[in-house]
Amino acid sequence: MLFFVFWATSCEITQLNQPDDEEEIDVVEGPTVAPTSTAEFENLFHGGGQRSWKTISFTFMGVGGIQDCRLDDSMTINADGTYEYDGGANLCGAEDSERVRTGTWEVTNDGRNIVFDSGTVNEYTADVTGAEDDQIALSGQYIGLNVSGVYQIN
């Protein structure tokens, strides 16, 4: 979902060092079972009409802890291949200066990838690492850092 296009590209990174081995990082475990088909994933993703998702965890590897500014973000996914992203009241800075944005999405690779804003300068592909019941887990890369997020039906 454009979860990553805006969630990843909109964070202002203030620390790029690996955390100390003793430093504890809060991680929310999300689903780990990948979808078996595009139809199965799309049914969960938009429910045949419209579905709203909220962020419950968002991390950059190498940046200590969860990116708190992402925890008030939500995205509405529409069955027609469009979305509306709401960055919440707590914007992250950098490219994240606009609260509401819209765009397109498409599921590829049998439900294992979501391509946001295909064919634009904002095109981003997120890997679906898990999807079940009311949660999805996505991963990808932004400026060479691994990014992961867990999202729940709102």
Image (cartoon, rainbow, N blue to C red):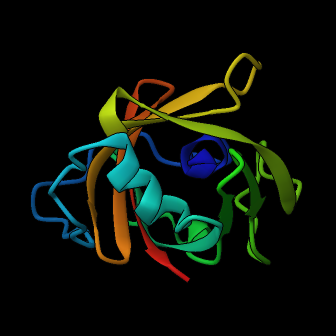
Quarter that holds the C terminus: bottom right
- Taking depth in this image into account, of 3 and 80 the one nearest to the observer is 80
Q: Position of residue 142 (x, y in %)?
A: 49, 31
Q: Residue at x 15, y 56 (%)?
A: 33
Q: Is residue 80 left or right of residue 142?
A: right
> Is 106 drawn above or below residue 7 in the view shown?
above
**Identity of the residue drawn at 52% across and 68% down:** 47
Report if residue 95 is visible in the image: yes
Which residue is at 65% across, 66% downward? 49
Q: Is residue 104 above or below residue 53?
A: above
70 sits to left or right of 63: right
Residue drawn at point x = 25 percent, y = 69 percent? 27
Closest to the observer: 112 or 150?
A: 112
72 and 152: which is toward the camera: 152
Residue 90 placement (x, y as % from top left): 74, 74
**Most foreground residue, 43 or 15:** 43
The quarter of the picture where residue 5 lies is top right
Q: Is residue 52 above or below residue 110?
A: below
Q: Is residue 63 visible?
A: no
Q: Position of residue 56 (x, y in %)?
A: 44, 75
Q: Residue furthest bottom?
A: 154
Q: Could you tell whether 107 is left or right of 137 in the image? A: right
Q: How many marks?
A: 0
